[in-house]
Image (cartoon, rainbow, N blue to C red):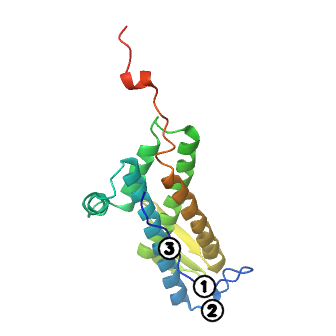
Amino acid sequence: MDDRKHTTVPRKVSKHDPAASYRTLSREDFDAIVTGELTHVAVWLELELETAIENYFAVRSDTREAFSRLILQREGMAFQTKIDIVRIIVSGNEFKQEYKDQWKGVLLRIEEIKRVRNAMAHGKDVGGQGLTIKVGYISRSGKETEIEIEPNSHAARMAEAEKLQDDLHELVAGIQDARIVPTASDRRGPSKG
Protein backbone atom coordinates (compact mmCIF):
# COMPACT_ATOMS: atom_id res chain seq x y z
CA MET A 1 0.00 0.00 0.00
CA ASP A 2 1.25 3.50 -0.79
CA ASP A 3 2.15 5.82 2.07
CA ARG A 4 1.05 8.97 0.20
CA LYS A 5 -1.63 10.90 2.02
CA HIS A 6 -3.45 14.00 0.87
CA THR A 7 -2.97 17.26 2.66
CA THR A 8 -4.43 20.69 2.26
CA VAL A 9 -2.85 24.09 2.35
CA PRO A 10 -3.49 25.54 5.81
CA ARG A 11 -5.56 28.70 5.63
CA LYS A 12 -7.40 30.63 8.30
CA VAL A 13 -11.03 29.78 7.67
CA SER A 14 -14.00 30.85 9.71
CA LYS A 15 -16.28 27.90 10.47
CA HIS A 16 -19.25 30.24 10.16
CA ASP A 17 -18.10 31.88 6.93
CA PRO A 18 -15.45 29.87 5.05
CA ALA A 19 -15.40 32.45 2.24
CA ALA A 20 -14.47 35.34 4.57
CA SER A 21 -10.72 35.04 3.99
CA TYR A 22 -11.23 35.35 0.21
CA ARG A 23 -13.19 38.60 0.55
CA THR A 24 -10.12 40.46 1.82
CA LEU A 25 -8.23 39.77 -1.42
CA SER A 26 -7.88 41.85 -4.55
CA ARG A 27 -9.47 40.41 -7.70
CA GLU A 28 -6.02 39.41 -9.03
CA ASP A 29 -5.06 37.73 -5.75
CA PHE A 30 -8.41 35.92 -5.54
CA ASP A 31 -7.93 34.66 -9.11
CA ALA A 32 -4.41 33.43 -8.24
CA ILE A 33 -5.54 31.77 -4.98
CA VAL A 34 -8.46 30.02 -6.69
CA THR A 35 -6.23 28.74 -9.50
CA GLY A 36 -3.59 27.62 -7.01
CA GLU A 37 -6.02 25.85 -4.68
CA LEU A 38 -7.71 24.05 -7.58
CA THR A 39 -4.32 23.01 -8.96
CA HIS A 40 -3.24 21.75 -5.54
CA VAL A 41 -6.40 19.65 -5.21
CA ALA A 42 -6.04 18.32 -8.78
CA VAL A 43 -2.47 17.18 -8.05
CA TRP A 44 -3.59 15.21 -4.98
CA LEU A 45 -6.53 13.68 -6.84
CA GLU A 46 -4.20 12.63 -9.65
CA LEU A 47 -1.77 11.06 -7.15
CA GLU A 48 -4.64 9.05 -5.66
CA LEU A 49 -5.64 7.83 -9.13
CA GLU A 50 -2.03 6.77 -9.73
CA THR A 51 -2.15 4.84 -6.46
CA ALA A 52 -5.41 3.18 -7.58
CA ILE A 53 -3.72 2.02 -10.79
CA GLU A 54 -0.66 0.77 -8.88
CA ASN A 55 -2.84 -1.03 -6.35
CA TYR A 56 -5.01 -2.64 -9.03
CA PHE A 57 -1.95 -4.02 -10.81
CA ALA A 58 -0.43 -5.00 -7.44
CA VAL A 59 2.78 -3.12 -8.17
CA ARG A 60 5.32 -4.19 -5.58
CA SER A 61 6.60 -1.52 -3.22
CA ASP A 62 10.17 -1.98 -4.50
CA THR A 63 9.08 -1.21 -8.10
CA ARG A 64 6.47 1.52 -7.47
CA GLU A 65 8.85 4.39 -8.03
CA ALA A 66 9.98 3.00 -11.39
CA PHE A 67 6.39 2.13 -12.40
CA SER A 68 5.28 5.64 -11.52
CA ARG A 69 8.19 7.31 -13.35
CA LEU A 70 8.09 5.12 -16.47
CA ILE A 71 4.34 4.67 -16.85
CA LEU A 72 2.19 7.05 -14.83
CA GLN A 73 4.18 10.28 -14.85
CA ARG A 74 5.66 10.23 -18.31
CA GLU A 75 4.85 12.95 -20.81
CA GLY A 76 1.54 12.26 -22.50
CA MET A 77 0.00 10.42 -19.54
CA ALA A 78 -2.53 13.15 -18.83
CA PHE A 79 -4.81 13.46 -15.82
CA GLN A 80 -7.83 12.60 -18.01
CA THR A 81 -6.05 9.49 -19.28
CA LYS A 82 -5.58 8.30 -15.68
CA ILE A 83 -9.26 8.99 -14.98
CA ASP A 84 -10.17 6.95 -18.07
CA ILE A 85 -7.87 4.07 -17.05
CA VAL A 86 -9.41 3.90 -13.58
CA ARG A 87 -12.91 4.12 -15.09
CA ILE A 88 -12.11 1.11 -17.30
CA ILE A 89 -10.52 -0.82 -14.42
CA VAL A 90 -13.46 -0.42 -12.05
CA SER A 91 -16.14 -1.00 -14.68
CA GLY A 92 -15.13 -4.64 -15.06
CA ASN A 93 -17.10 -7.61 -13.79
CA GLU A 94 -14.50 -8.36 -11.15
CA PHE A 95 -15.87 -5.62 -8.85
CA LYS A 96 -19.01 -5.48 -6.77
CA GLN A 97 -21.71 -3.23 -8.25
CA GLU A 98 -21.83 -0.98 -5.19
CA TYR A 99 -18.09 -0.33 -5.49
CA LYS A 100 -18.42 0.41 -9.23
CA ASP A 101 -21.25 2.86 -8.50
CA GLN A 102 -19.16 4.64 -5.87
CA TRP A 103 -16.29 5.01 -8.34
CA LYS A 104 -18.64 6.30 -11.04
CA GLY A 105 -19.77 9.15 -8.79
CA VAL A 106 -16.27 9.95 -7.54
CA LEU A 107 -14.83 10.05 -11.07
CA LEU A 108 -17.55 12.49 -12.18
CA ARG A 109 -16.72 14.70 -9.18
CA ILE A 110 -13.02 14.56 -10.07
CA GLU A 111 -13.80 15.57 -13.66
CA GLU A 112 -15.78 18.55 -12.38
CA ILE A 113 -12.83 19.76 -10.27
CA LYS A 114 -10.54 19.21 -13.27
CA ARG A 115 -12.91 21.13 -15.55
CA VAL A 116 -13.00 24.17 -13.26
CA ARG A 117 -9.25 24.00 -12.63
CA ASN A 118 -8.55 23.89 -16.38
CA ALA A 119 -10.93 26.79 -17.00
CA MET A 120 -9.11 28.90 -14.40
CA ALA A 121 -5.67 27.92 -15.70
CA HIS A 122 -6.36 28.13 -19.44
CA GLY A 123 -9.52 30.20 -19.87
CA LYS A 124 -9.94 33.94 -20.34
CA ASP A 125 -11.43 36.42 -17.90
CA VAL A 126 -14.60 37.49 -19.70
CA GLY A 127 -16.10 39.71 -17.05
CA GLY A 128 -17.67 39.86 -13.67
CA GLN A 129 -17.32 42.55 -11.05
CA GLY A 130 -15.26 42.64 -7.90
CA LEU A 131 -14.52 39.12 -6.73
CA THR A 132 -17.02 37.55 -9.11
CA ILE A 133 -14.90 36.19 -11.93
CA LYS A 134 -16.35 34.91 -15.18
CA VAL A 135 -14.02 32.68 -17.17
CA GLY A 136 -14.67 31.64 -20.75
CA TYR A 137 -13.12 28.60 -22.37
CA ILE A 138 -13.68 26.11 -25.14
CA SER A 139 -14.65 22.63 -23.89
CA ARG A 140 -13.10 19.41 -25.21
CA SER A 141 -16.11 19.03 -27.50
CA GLY A 142 -15.58 22.53 -28.94
CA LYS A 143 -18.42 24.21 -27.07
CA GLU A 144 -17.92 27.75 -25.77
CA THR A 145 -18.50 27.67 -22.03
CA GLU A 146 -18.37 30.11 -19.14
CA ILE A 147 -17.99 29.50 -15.45
CA GLU A 148 -18.46 31.97 -12.64
CA ILE A 149 -16.47 31.85 -9.43
CA GLU A 150 -16.93 34.03 -6.39
CA PRO A 151 -15.84 33.58 -2.77
CA ASN A 152 -18.89 31.59 -1.62
CA SER A 153 -18.93 29.19 -4.58
CA HIS A 154 -15.18 28.65 -4.32
CA ALA A 155 -15.34 27.96 -0.57
CA ALA A 156 -18.12 25.43 -1.23
CA ARG A 157 -16.06 23.83 -4.01
CA MET A 158 -13.03 23.53 -1.71
CA ALA A 159 -15.18 21.91 1.00
CA GLU A 160 -16.47 19.45 -1.61
CA ALA A 161 -12.89 18.83 -2.78
CA GLU A 162 -11.85 17.94 0.77
CA LYS A 163 -14.69 15.41 1.01
CA LEU A 164 -13.85 14.12 -2.46
CA GLN A 165 -10.24 13.51 -1.42
CA ASP A 166 -11.43 11.48 1.57
CA ASP A 167 -13.94 9.48 -0.52
CA LEU A 168 -11.33 8.78 -3.20
CA HIS A 169 -8.70 7.73 -0.67
CA GLU A 170 -11.15 5.23 0.84
CA LEU A 171 -11.99 3.73 -2.58
CA VAL A 172 -8.32 3.48 -3.55
CA ALA A 173 -7.43 1.76 -0.29
CA GLY A 174 -10.13 -0.86 -0.91
CA ILE A 175 -9.50 -1.63 -4.57
CA GLN A 176 -8.15 -5.13 -3.90
CA ASP A 177 -10.79 -5.99 -1.28
CA ALA A 178 -13.66 -4.91 -3.54
CA ARG A 179 -12.82 -7.52 -6.14
CA ILE A 180 -15.21 -10.41 -6.42
CA VAL A 181 -13.27 -13.57 -5.67
CA PRO A 182 -13.82 -16.05 -8.49
CA THR A 183 -15.03 -19.52 -7.63
CA ALA A 184 -13.03 -22.62 -8.59
CA SER A 185 -15.30 -23.19 -11.59
CA ASP A 186 -14.78 -19.58 -12.74
CA ARG A 187 -11.00 -20.10 -12.69
CA ARG A 188 -11.29 -23.28 -14.79
CA GLY A 189 -13.15 -21.45 -17.51
CA PRO A 190 -16.23 -22.54 -19.44
CA SER A 191 -17.11 -26.20 -19.37
CA LYS A 192 -16.66 -28.22 -22.52
CA GLY A 193 -19.83 -30.06 -22.77
Left or right of residue 61, residue 3 in this image:
right
Residue bearing mark 2: 24
Q: CA distance from mark 3 to mark 1?
A: 17 Å
Residue bearing mark 3: 38
Left or right of residue 141, residue 110 in this image:
right
Q: Residue 192's image quarter?
A: top left
Q: Are marks 3 and 2 in contact (CB under 8 Å)?
A: no
Label disc, if present, on residue 131 of the rendered structure: 1
Q: Nearer the viewer, mark 3 or mark 1?
A: 3
Q: Is residue 141 visible?
A: no
Residue 89 picture location, percent across and down: 42, 44
Residue 142 picture location, percent across and down: 41, 59
Q: Nearer the viewer, mark 1 or mark 2?
A: 2
Of the 4 image quadrants, the one containing the C terminus is top left
Within 10 Å of disc 1 (Cα), the crowding (few <14, some 14-19, many 20+) is: some
Q: Amino acid at mark 1?
A: Leu
- Seen from the viewer's position, the closer of residues 158 and 118 is 158
Residue in view at x 36 percent, y 47 percent: 57
Residue in view at x 39 percent, y 26 percent: 187
Left or right of residue 97, residue 83 in this image:
left
Which circle's residue, 1 or 2, is located before the other in the chain?
A: 2
Of the 4 image quadrants, the one containing the N terminus is bottom left
Q: Amino acid at mark 3?
A: Leu
SS class of the residue under badge 3?
helix
Q: CA distance from mark 3 to mark 2?
A: 19 Å
SS class of the residue under badge 1?
loop
Rendered view: 75 above or below 96: below
Residue in view at x 59 percent, y 72 percent: 158
